[in-house]
């Protein structure tokens, strides 16, 4: 089933593949200091990290069209072979499928 309305598109189909991973970004700031014959000061840098869960699905519609779904930031469970319905609410791009 594929239905279009002015602000959204509804697509349903069968999940043919699932890939999951996480992107982790590590960064540091601060640190440094000085040392002299009279003493000194040394500050350790601050280290921080952020992680984003990623899921990429390939969905095959009832008419055989293959669509890639990128679910960045969502930790949702799916099984290959499951039938799902997805709704996107902005202008479609060939390689990006924002979900609502």
Image (spheres, rainbow, N blue to C red):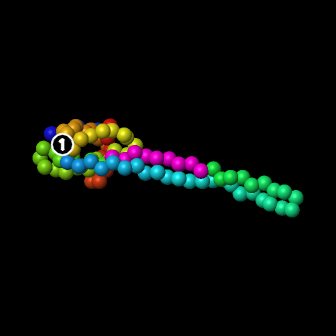
Give how far across and how far down residue 72 sits, in percent. Answer: 37, 46
Find out whether residue 92 is within the magenta segment: no
| Count of marks overlaid on the render | 1
Q: Would you say the magenta stretch is mainly helix, strand or loop?
A: strand
Quadrant placement of the N terminus: top left
Q: Nearer the viewer, residue 73 or 100?
A: 73
Give how far across and how far down residue 34 sits, in percent. Answer: 78, 59
**Residue at position x 19%, y 39% in the image:** 82
Q: Quadrant of residue 32?
A: bottom right
Query: On the picture, is 12 further left or further right than 33?
Result: left
**Residue at position x 56%, y 53% in the image:** 27
Start and end of the magenta stretch? 47-55
Q: Residues within 10 Å of mark 1 (few under 14, many from 20)?
A: few
**Residue at position x 57%, y 48% in the image:** 48
Label 1 SS = loop
Give how far across and how far down residue 6 sits, in percent. Answer: 26, 39
Relative to 65, say whether 99 is above or below. above
Q: Which residue is mark 1?
A: 81
């Amino acid at each position: 089933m594929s239905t279009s309305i002015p602000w959204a598109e509804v697509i349903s189909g069968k999940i043919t593949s699932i890939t999951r991973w996480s992107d982790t970004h590590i960064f540091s700031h601060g640190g440094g200091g000085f040392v002299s014959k009279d003493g000194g000061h040394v500050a350790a840098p601050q280290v921080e990290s952020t992680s984003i869960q990623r899921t990429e699905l390939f969905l095959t519609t009832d008419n055989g069209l293959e669509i890639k779904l990128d679910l960045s930031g969502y930790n949702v469970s799916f099984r290959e072979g499951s039938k799902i319905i997805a709704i996107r609410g902005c202008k479609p791009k060939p390689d990006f499928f924002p979900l609502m």
